[in-house]
Amino acid sequence: MTRPVIGFAGLTHLGLVSAVGTASKGFRVVGYDADADRVREIAAGRMPVVEPGLDDMARANSASLSYTDRLDDLAACDIVYISTDVPTDDRGQSDLSGISALVGRVIPALGPRALLVILCQVPPGFTRGLPLAPERLYYQVETLVFGRAVERATQPERFIVGCADPARSLPEPYAALLGAFGCPLLPMRYESAELAKIAINCCLVASVTVANTLAELSEGIGADWSEIAPALRLDRRIGAHSYLAPGLGIAGGNLERDLATVMRLSETAGGDASVIAAFVNNSRHRRDWALRIVHRHVLAHKPSPTFGVLGLAYKKNTHSTKNSPSLALIENLRPWPVRVYDPVVPASAAPHPAVHAASTPLEAARGSDALLIMTPWPEFRKLRPADLAGVMAGRIVVDPYCVLDPAAVRAAGLIHLVLGAPASADSRRL
Amino acid sequence: MLEHLNAGAGKPARVVVIGAGGFVGGAIVEQLRRDGVAVLGLTRNEIDLLQDGAAAKLATMLRAEDGVVFVSALAPARTSALLVQNLRMAEAVVQALASQPVAHLVYISSDAVYADDANPVTERSYCHPSTLHGMMHAARELMLKSEVKAPLAILRPSLLYGARDPHNGYGPNRFRRLAEKGETITLFGEGEEQRDHIHVDDVARLVGLVLAHRSRGTLNIATGNSTSFRAVAEKVVGLAGKSVDVRGTPRQNPATHRHFDVTDCLKAFPQFRYTPLDEGLARAAQSGAKS
């Protein structure tokens, strides 16, 4: 058979990366979005999202990629993915009105035998409720990771596919598409697949929460979590790729959404989800780690400091600032001058009345009493602590993710405060 | 978490402190006067909240533009009778505020409303008091939240100390008095329990800030640094400059600790600094010696 044509409705972060990744496997891809301006920009090669490798891959596969704001163009597709964003509110609750409306518009535009695949994060029960014949309707778990989205889209560990009847073989076009990625395929009931996505995220959060809890304990008792985590990764029951790097709580929106969904469903079903609530509480506690450090190690000694902040994005290699610990910190530094630098996010994103937009990391550090490296962008790893010491007014470097070499920081006469390690004795003598 | 209804700090038209004769109330009145705020301090002499007609009498003393600090309590409420009396006092305040609404209400509660094992305590920790005293404060909070229309700030201080503390409970105040007299300080066990000790002046300064910002919501009053009773005792002995024995006893109950996550306070009042324990104990020792 000829290779199926694949459509993506919704050129969001997920949709765009998935479309480009699918084209890289040799399929013709139609990317649809109702926003004509967005379509025009993407077609011109100006990607609205920052992802390593995305621009190059889109250029290399431009012959098999087309972008459109016309729903009718999806009629040529054998499979259409729904790949729009499902926004969340402050409590992690999904607003499904957008995806429901999009599905309502796409179904009439489908070819008569075309399949529809839901690729977004939806709560269990959503897919089964859609008005399309079950044999044409699927749910596929996406495991997008901001900053590693291209790698995830082109080299998935497995496909988890929600079906009306998992005992039946997948339709030929869909099997051909997924087979091109050469990874295991796990068909299951719609609800199982929808919950599998949430289960993956809950396991990740559990690992991160364990790391955060024990990293905090390490800070308090003189242990160093960075010495412990490698030992855990060599344990086969834990695993080499487990999420054991301590962080500043859970951010980005998607994990928070799944935790909120589990709590809501468990409340309805009568289950015990208290551990999930504990994850949420711990995340909130750890998000403010840098603020507490600033008060303890800087403001307790100097009431009118200047701060330098490197990084505004919620993690490296992304433009997203959803629930960003950096912005949460800066919002609480309003009484004091703050100099910020981020390679991608503009300083105007900082919730601060008098933020200074620096054009380089060193300029942000210049004159600061404390420098806070709030996003572990790769370029920050190249900073030389001696250069920082040369331009800073003070000696404190708050480096939660330890992007700088601790020995070099100490050698430069700076005090290095990182997650999971006890504060050095000299920081208490300031 | 507190929400500031006044974007910047302002001066309340007048503040009425109900319970101005007490340890905390007195410190609040002094602080407000130092800040140049018009204060009406009400002690039991002016209004006895347990007397018939107290609500009506209190209402006549209030004005619509007032900020009110309700700090009066029969504390610690260790018996059912004291619990009920304290609730009746709160009932009088609720009734007075119903007939004479005010601009702002600040209630001085206690961290006793939290479960003993709530660590680290935040403003979102569950209220699960293990004592009648804690239940009294929790019930009063709920009475005020349910029935008072004015913006309400609930402040929950940890263990308080200061030269004029009339209570002689286990902790810095009793240790200081014993040390000044050269008497042995006896610890429960080895005094391992860690607590967050607050100088009463810090409560007064925070009340001033809450009034100035017309804040509403809940805030714990704690430094974020917990210290063992033995360490407190040894600091106090050092300040007294006398040879005082700090003696442990066989432990009767498992040691429990209390720590606070004070992030909400850092966010609400970023420029506020708690008095470090060493400095506060020294101040209490000096004031105590003078008195």
Image (spheres, coloured by chain):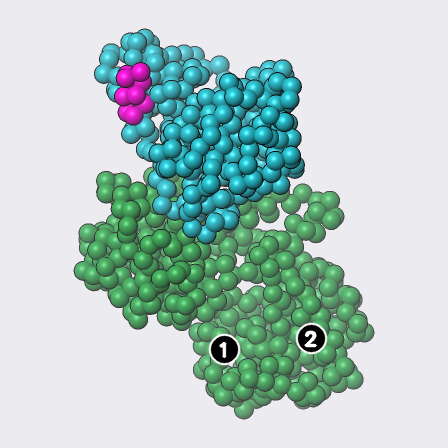
Chain colours: A green, B cyan
In the figure, B243 relative to A143: above or below?
A: above
Name the foreground residue: A9 vs A6. Answer: A9
Question: Dot 1 surroundings within 10 Å: few (below 14), some, or many (20 or more)?
Answer: some
Query: Magenta region, mostly helix, strand or loop?
Result: helix
Mark 2 lies on a secondary structure that is helix
Horizontal relation, residue B14 to residue A402: left or right: right
Name the foreground residue: B267 vs A293. Answer: B267
Q: Which chain does the residue under circle 2 lie in?
A: A
In the figure, A192 relative to B75: above or below?
A: below
Amino acid marked by disc 1: Pro
Residue A392 drawn at (x, y percent): 22, 58
Amino acid marked by disc 2: Leu
- Which disc number belongs to residue A48? 1
Magenta stretch, residue numbers: B282-291
Query: Which residue lies under the disc numbered 2?
Result: A102
Quarter of the image that includes the C terminus of chain B:
top left
Q: Is residue B78 visible?
A: yes
Horizontal relation, residue A154 to residue A128: left or right: left
Q: Quadrant of residue A13?
A: bottom right
Name the foreground residue: A158 vs B252. Answer: B252
Q: Residue at x 40, y 70 (%)?
A: A346
> Which sits earlier in the primary sequence, circle 1 or circle 2?
1
Q: Which chain does the residue under circle 1 lie in?
A: A
Do the dots labelled 1 and 2 sit on one chain? yes
- Furthest-front residue in this view: B60
Residue B209 drawn at (x, y percent): 42, 41
